[in-house]
Amino acid sequence: MNTTFTERLSSMHTSSTPKIVSPRDGKAGSLGSIGVRFMIDTEETDAGGFSLLEHPMPPRKLAAPLHRHSREDEYSFVLEGRMGALLGDDVVYAGPGDLVHKPRDQWHTFWNAGDEPCHVLEIIAPGGFENFFDELVDAGVAGPPEPAWLAALGARYGLEFDFESVPELCERFGVTFG
């Protein structure tokens, strides 16, 4: 028996409803040195496959100390500006349309490597790590968070920091933190 497209479509099970995220949608806040806007969270993806954030970064700002994730990979898609990243021992630069993969268990950091604002879409897989950023925003971080507090928060999310890396990173890449 032949079915119409509409009949087949109506019989398909979907786990979520369609969603359009406009440039002003989603909770937004400060992570201390850069911003964050929550676009798609884990609960909105099939089985928590990923989450999607936007990171607006002011010129010449370091996003975070060197750090590594034990539970997820991150993918940074540059919308505008120039993003630099230290991935293990490799330094890479990405511009609009470039995608940078930051694999789990690899020490890394990233920054705005230009004199203009930089906007990055951050895909986190699997999802769940967006809750770390949510806790930072809810804490009202105005500058770099206190290291002991941030280390404790990070530990709950399988995240390890090298806070001593900040001065060297700032000098090496001509950026500021906080």
Image (spheres, rainbow, N blue to C red):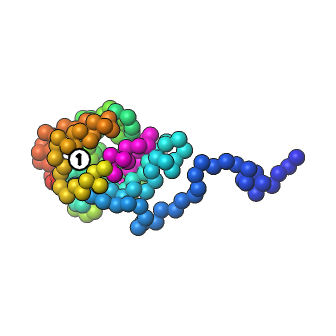
Whether residue 90 is visible, yes or no, is no
Write down the region rendered in magenta. Answer: 119-134
Q: Nearer the viewer, residue 135 or 107?
A: 135
Mark 1, other Cα within 10 Å: few <14 / some 14–19 / many ≥20? many
Residue 160 at least partly seen = yes
Of 177 and 140, the residue lying toward us? 140
Q: Determine if the magenta segment contains residue 86.
A: no
Q: Which residue is mark 1?
A: 64
Secondary structure of residue under mark 1: loop
Left or right of 94, for residue 32: left
The image shows residue 101, relative to residue 143, as above or below, that is: above
**Image coordinates for residue 123, horizontal then vertical, percent:** 42, 47
In this view, the residue in front, 94 or 70, is 70
Q: Residue furthest right?
A: 1
Q: Residue 84 at x, y = what percent? A: 27, 49
Residue 62 x, y percent position in the rendering: 21, 51
Residue at x 63% of width, y 49% of height = 14
At 58% from the left and 56% from the top, the residue drawn is 17
Name which quarter of the figure residue 102 lies in: top left
Give the farthest residue toward the front.
139
Name the residue at 33% across, 38% down.
157
Question: Is residue 120 within the magenta segment?
Answer: yes
Report how many numbered discs are placed on residues in the image: 1
The type of residue carrying mark 1 is Ala
Tell me the residue at 37%/43% (across/down): 129
Which of the image's four quarters has the C terminus?
Answer: bottom left
